[in-house]
Amino acid sequence: MKKIISICLMMFSIHAFAQDCNSYYYLQNNKIVEMTIYNKKGDAGGKVIYTVSKVSGNASALTATVNTEMLDKKGKSIAKGANNIKCDNGVMMMDIKMFLPQQQAEMLKETEATASNVYLDYPATMSVGDKLKDANFNMDMNTNGMKQSMSMNITDRNVAAKESVTTTAGTWECYKIVYKSNTNIKTMGIGIPFNMDVAEWFAPGFGTVKTESKYGSTVITSIK
């Protein structure tokens, strides 16, 4: 009987830990996270700085604002934005605008844009072979009087492997998630597609520590 109780308590503890949202770095107030951008040759080409603010809720349900600033390789600011992040019972929900390719993110600095919030889910528990939810997003833009539209589709999200990742910011046991990203910007009905296959390394209970595509990679290099 004692053995059964012990097993039940252990399972409850594991479940409770999995539902905790506090450990995600995007949901820790005043946290500053630095991601370094590398080109396909492996040379550093800039940084993205995330500053977390306005965290509210409790351990199992949190929301936060993440202020984003993109810097070029000389440290000059080239784009800024703010996104909403949520977590509900351990399920991390990231604003899909944070996944825009660098070129599209830079375009938005001169643009008035309107869009609804769309989130990409990361389950509290996952296993190699799991298929994750897709997401699609649409935005209307006005650049100096010129109206444009942008669509972004993230599809075929699969948990491909479990790997350890070490950066200057630490070491994490991660799930490698692969997916297809399709971004299309239309001007006067003419579309410019931007397609790529992406891999990201996601540490449960922490967040994404690395991404990679044919154009280069981003790696978490500092947490303050």
Image (cartoon, helix red, strand yellow):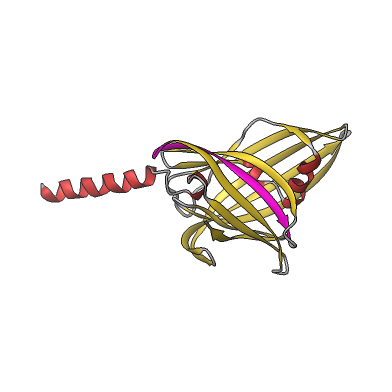
Q: Nearer the viewer, residue 134 or 61?
A: 61
- Would residue 152 appear left or right of 28 to someone viewing this image? right
Query: Which residue is depicted at the point 70% across and 45% down?
Result: 80
Q: Is residue 61 magenta?
A: yes
Q: Nearer the viewer, residue 164 or 110?
A: 110
* Residue span colored magenta: 58-72
| Helix, strand or loop for the magenta stretch, by majority | strand
- Would residue 96 appear left or right of 29 to someone viewing this image? right
Name the image quarter holding residue 212.
Answer: bottom right
Q: Nearer the viewer, residue 99 or 54?
A: 54
Q: Position of residue 166 (x, y in %)?
A: 51, 67
Query: Which residue is depicted at the point 75% across and 62% down?
Result: 74
Whether residue 203 is situated above or below residue 118 in the rendered picture: below
Q: Is residue 219 magenta?
A: no
Q: How many marks?
A: 0
Q: Position of residue 85 (x, y in %)?
A: 55, 40
Name the image quarter holding residue 149.
Answer: top right
- State the residue lying farthest toward the left: 1
Q: Position of residue 109 (x, y in %)?
A: 77, 43
Q: Nearer the viewer, residue 175 or 47?
A: 47
Q: Position of residue 38 (x, y in %)?
A: 69, 63
